[in-house]
Image (cartoon, rainbow, N blue to C red):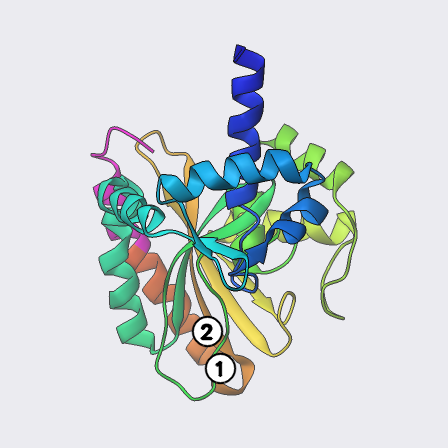
Amino acid sequence: MTTDNTMQTISRAISILKSFSRDDRELSLADFHHRLGLSKSSLQRILSTLVSQGFLEKDNEKKTYKLGIELYYLGNLVEEHSHLLRIVKPYLILVRDKTNENVYLNIIENDLRKCIALEEAKHDLMTISYVGQTSPLYAGASAKLLLAYLTADEIQLYLENMEKEKITNVTKTERDELVEEIRFINQNGYAISYGERVPGVCSVSVPLYNRWNKVIASLSISAPLSRVDDDIVSNFIQILRETSKSINEELRFVSQD
């Protein structure tokens, strides 16, 4: 097999694994065929290999596939050895316990905000999110904060090419509005949003820095609007600032992002 063919096969295998989501935990050969546009013969070869290596499990009765246990082991290794997750995880629990609201760690991936860690509050009514969830950089506090700390050229490029889709009726998509929000975030060091991505939800977010003083993530709290007022939002900001200061001190001594 040539190098090009090998790379193509690897790329296809990755595409297969990334086809799964929180809502699509079992997929059939036909599902992969329709989603990826690959021939069924090629898919069968790659699926068989992924099953044999433990990355997928096959249900022979239903003729469907789901993610395998090997990915669970690898995921644990990632969490165990990721400096950012290792350092931040205890602080997520601390903030969750102080506020009794959901607390998130977010990064930028492929021009999207992505949640990479979450500690959930214990409420009958609470905001809904999950690890792996993504959203555009113009919607919501955690996303806009990450956008605000890109370079000026990166921000300009994003604003010029972004799709102006209103996620809710209060989502801001106009360039002037977003530039003003970015200016506010840079001046104040935090972002707030009210129902911009999810109706009825308030979010507050602050930046996390690596040892080179570059923002690498956002630390965020979200809560239903029915449970917040100005004083509570101010308290969220204070708790996040204090927590981010402690996290940033630890990240200063880490040699990797």
Q: Secondary structure at mark 2?
A: helix
Q: Is residue 116 left or right of residue 249?
A: right
Q: Secondary structure at mark 1?
A: loop
Please report the bounds of the magenta region as a residue range: 244-257
Instruction: Specify whether residue 185 is in view.
Output: no
Which residue is depicted at the point 38% across and 66% down? Answer: 103
Which mark is on residue 30? none
Q: Amino acid at mark 2?
A: Val
Q: Is residue 51 left or right of residue 199?
A: left
On whether residue 192 falls in the magenta region, the answer is no
Name the residue carrying label 1. Answer: 228
Report the front residue among 20 and 55: 55
Residue 127, given in percent of the width and then of the height, sits at 50, 75
Q: Is residue 107 left or right of residue 29?
A: left
Which residue is depicted at the point 37% across and 34% down? Answer: 213
Instruction: Say few, some or many: other residues with alpha carbon within 10 Å of mark 1 (under 14 / 14 to 19 / 20 or more).
Output: some
Which mark is on residue 233? 2
Residue 215, given in percent of the width and then of the height, sits at 43, 39
Which residue is depicted at the point 76% across and 55% down? Answer: 173
Which residue is depicted at the point 24% across and 51% down? Answer: 246
- Which numbered disc flags the more N-terminal residue, 1 or 2? 1
Report the front residue among 211 and 125: 125
Q: Amino acid at mark 1?
A: Val
